[in-house]
Image (tube, coloured by chain):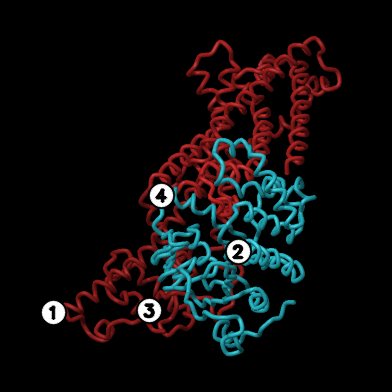
């Protein structure tokens, strides 16, 4: 087997206030090109795990390797450079609401351009062309100069995907990308992520609420419960008993088509 | 639930030789002392304040003099203590309320009148010399069969406020305080004048319909000076307040150094803000001894605006969405880029809106500041009023009303556009 792309070793995160343990000794490996889905109840540590991987949150203990680089030991400056290769999309899209879609997409190139130019809002022609290409890819070319808050939820998430595409990432972190969307829109957004995974070979780590979505898109599933890794395997391996273990005895599976 | 007194204190003499018993005695004894003293002091304080205010009103109404007490201090002290004892024994007093205890029978039942009377009598032999308190339970509690114990709302219907001693006390206190306030600020002669001498201002009101046209040019010039004062003050205040606001935002200033800078700026700003612009204007008039009065007025408005805007700006900064900061950071952007793409888009419009609002306030304030000599239209108004030039004063007022109304309307419209 090839060298794994992402290695998480004994990752632990303790929040200072209230001494809440968000992650307890989590370890797993991800191969290049995998579509890894993280499932678990709200508060089980999914978001914390994703944010530890690009160090938006500093892990308390443990090591993370991406492509052989131990990112938990990088300096803030090195980490900033490294983040360019890690795209991220969010549950609430986190777009600049007052700015145009184009500006939002271009922010994906901030790490590649000199600071003074970006402060004045100047991006090279090649970046602008790339932005339009990526917008076309997510089917929003005609919305390029519309204000972001005028778009629907699904469209806003697609802008988020285009922003991540601008980074030309090797790894995509998706923090509950479809939780704020309706079922039909969810599938369209998930398909764009799947497309990134298949066509561009981007390794994807996505946290999802619905098991049906996880089964449909994931090549592998890990499950967190109260910050601990309780399952790691293929989607088919999650049967009724496993499901109850992850979500608790009273849980009932909800289908989303 | 009966209080957990050590057996020895209830049934037999304390064994002074046993260290544990002594410690227990001190603990419970001092605990009781604290409880009884706090209730007695609260009640005595309350009654003393009430008595001082009452006697103040009586003296004011009967003699027209300002005085504070009708009785010598020792009689006053005795009376207050006695009133407190009566109040504590026969009602649920102020002190009982605050300490959250009440007078109940030891078995928890409602006390009978004769028991309350016994408690009141024994209050004198134990509370006043303070010795009885050191016993546990205190002597007067033991002898009367009543004890102070925490009250809860369970199982008892609350009385309406006018049937509780505290309610009556507070209502009486408020009534007396209001009477005292009225007697200081309003006199009968003033009221008579208010209703009979309205005619003296007739010229002033008439000028609203026939203004003095000869001073229009002068007034407009003063008006422009006022607007300019407000503009200069606002413009310079923005330049200072914008950078300061970043240092005064709790979410941006972390760590020991950050927090101390935050605290210093916030405290300074709130002190500056609590002093009115008029006071600042007088202060600057003395300080700079200006030939050109508007400069002092402008400085006063500037200082007040800086503190006000810093607070408004910083509060806006504190409520920005952290999600966007996360998203921009995740693209590999550095701090400046995060500021430009995640923070500034969220604050630009509110900042402009606050600035307009402050400019609007400054124009209104500029007229007031002018009255103390800060230049502009306020100074003109003051000049005419002082010289009994009612017609001219009315004319100036007309212009002030027009200006304030126009600016109000303009800034409201602009802010609605920005929202």
Of the two numbered discs 3 and 2 in the rendering, the one whose residue sits closer to the viewer = 2
Residue drawn at x 51%, y 44% as measured from the top left = B335
Q: Name which quarter of the figure residue A115 lies in.
A: top right
Q: Colour of chain A?
A: cyan
Q: Which residue is mark 1?
A: B17
Mark 3 surroundings within 10 Å by alpha-carbon count, few (fewer than 14), some (14 through 19), many (20 or more): many
Of the 4 image quadrants, the one containing the N terminus of chain B is bottom left
Q: CA distance from mark 3 to mark 1?
A: 29 Å
Q: Single out the mark in the foreground, 2 or 4.
A: 2
Q: Which mark is residue A201?
A: 2
**Residue drawn at (57%, 38%), measured in percent from left and top?**
B184
Crowding at label 4, few (<14), some or many (≥20) Cα neighbours within 10 Å?
A: few
Residue sitting at the far front: A1
Q: Considering only vertical position in the picture, is B289 above or below B189?
A: above
Residue B255's tag is 4
Q: Nearer the viewer, residue B298 or A162?
A: A162
Please tell me whether mark 3 sits on a helix, a strand or a loop.
Answer: helix
Quadrant containing the C terminus of chain B is top right
Q: Colour of chain B?
A: red
Image coordinates of residue B26 in percent, x first then y, are 24, 72
Could you give the CA–CA distance between mark 2 and mark 4, rounded to whole angstroms? 41 Å
**Mark 2 secondary-structure assignment:** loop
Instruction: Where is residue B160? Give x, y as percent.
Output: 61, 69
List the residue tagged with mark 3: B144
Is label 3 on the same chain as label 1?
yes
Cα separation, mark 3 vs mark 4, equals 60 Å
């Amino acid at each position: 087997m090839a060298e794994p792309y992402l290695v998480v070793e004994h990752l632990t995160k303790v929040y200072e206030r209230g001494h809440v343990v968000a992650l307890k000794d989590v370890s797993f490996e991800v191969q290049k090109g995998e579509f890894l889905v993280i499932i678990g109840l709200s508060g089980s540590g999914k978001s914390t795990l994703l944010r530890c991987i690009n160090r938006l949150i500093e892990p308390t203990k443990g090591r993370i390797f991406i492509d052989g680089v131990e990112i938990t030991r990088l300096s803030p400056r090195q980490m900033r450079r490294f983040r360019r290769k890690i795209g991220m999309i969010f549950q609430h899209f986190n777009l600049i609401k007052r700015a145009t879609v184009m500006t939002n997409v271009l922010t994906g190139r901030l790490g590649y351009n000199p600071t003074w130019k970006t402060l004045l809002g100047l991006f090279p022609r090649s970046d602008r062309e790339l932005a339009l290409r990526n917008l076309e890819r997510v089917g929003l070319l005609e919305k390029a100069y519309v204000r972001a808050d005028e778009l629907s939820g699904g469209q806003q998430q697609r802008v988020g995907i285009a922003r991540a595409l601008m980074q030309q990432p090797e790894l995509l972190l998706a923090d509950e990308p479809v939780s704020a969307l309706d079922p039909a829109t969810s599938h369209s957004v998930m398909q764009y992520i799947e497309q990134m995974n298949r066509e561009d070979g981007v390794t994807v780590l996505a946290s999802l609420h619905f098991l049906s979505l996880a089964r449909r898109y994931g090549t592998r599933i890990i499950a967190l419960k109260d910050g601990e890794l309780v399952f790691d395997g293929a989607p088919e391996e999650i049967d009724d008993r496993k499901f109850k273990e992850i979500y608790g005895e009273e849980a009932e599976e909800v289908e989303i088509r | 639930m009966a209080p957990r007194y050590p057996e020895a204190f209830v049934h037999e003499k304390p064994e002074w030789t046993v260290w544990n018993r002594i410690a227990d005695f001190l603990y419970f004894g001092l605990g009781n002392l604290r409880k009884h003293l706090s209730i007695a002091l609260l009640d005595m304080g309350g009654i003393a304040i009430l008595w001082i205010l009452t006697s103040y009103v009586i003296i004011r109404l009967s003699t027209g003099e300002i005085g504070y007490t009708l009785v010598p201090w020792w009689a006053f002290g005795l009376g207050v203590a006695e009133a407190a004892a009566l109040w504590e024994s026969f009602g649920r007093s102020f002190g009982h309320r605050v300490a959250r205890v009440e007078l109940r029978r030891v078995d928890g039942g409602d006390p009978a009148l004769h028991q309350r009377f016994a408690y009141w009598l024994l209050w004198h032999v134990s509370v006043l010399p303070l010795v009885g308190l050191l016993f546990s339970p205190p002597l007067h509690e033991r002898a009367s069969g009543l004890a102070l114990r925490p009250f809860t709302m369970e199982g008892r219907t609350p009385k309406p406020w006018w049937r509780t001693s505290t309610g009556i006390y507070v209502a009486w206190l408020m009534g007396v305080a209001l009477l005292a306030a009225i007697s200081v600020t309003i006199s009968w002669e003033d009221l008579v004048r208010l209703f009979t001498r309205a005619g003296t201002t007739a010229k002033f009101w008439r000028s609203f319909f026939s203004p003095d046209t000869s001073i229009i040019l002068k007034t407009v010039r003063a008006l422009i000076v006022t607007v300019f004062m407000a503009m200069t003050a606002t413009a310079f205040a923005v330049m200072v307040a914008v950078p300061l606001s970043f240092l005064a935002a709790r979410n941006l200033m972390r760590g020991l150094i950050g927090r101390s800078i935050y605290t210093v700026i916030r405290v300074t700003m709130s002190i500056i803000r609590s002093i009115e612009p008029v006071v600042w204007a007088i202060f600057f008039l003395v300080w700079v001894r200006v030939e050109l009065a508007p400069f002092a007025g402008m400085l006063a408005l500037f200082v007040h605006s800086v503190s006000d805007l810093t607070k408004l700006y910083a509060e806006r900064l504190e409520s920005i969405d952290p999600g966007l900061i996360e998203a921009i950071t995740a693209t590999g952007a550095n701090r400046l880029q995060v500021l430009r793409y995640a923070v500034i888009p969220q604050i630009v419009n509110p900042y402009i809106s606050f600035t307009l609002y402050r400019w609007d306030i400054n124009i209104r304030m500029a007229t007031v500041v002018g009255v103390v000599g800060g230049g502009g239209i306020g100074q003109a108004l003051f000049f005419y009023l002082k010289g009994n030039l009612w017609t001219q004063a009315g004319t100036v007022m007309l212009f002030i009303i027009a200006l304030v109304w126009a600016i109000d309307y303009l800034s409201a419209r602009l802010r609605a556009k920005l929202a």
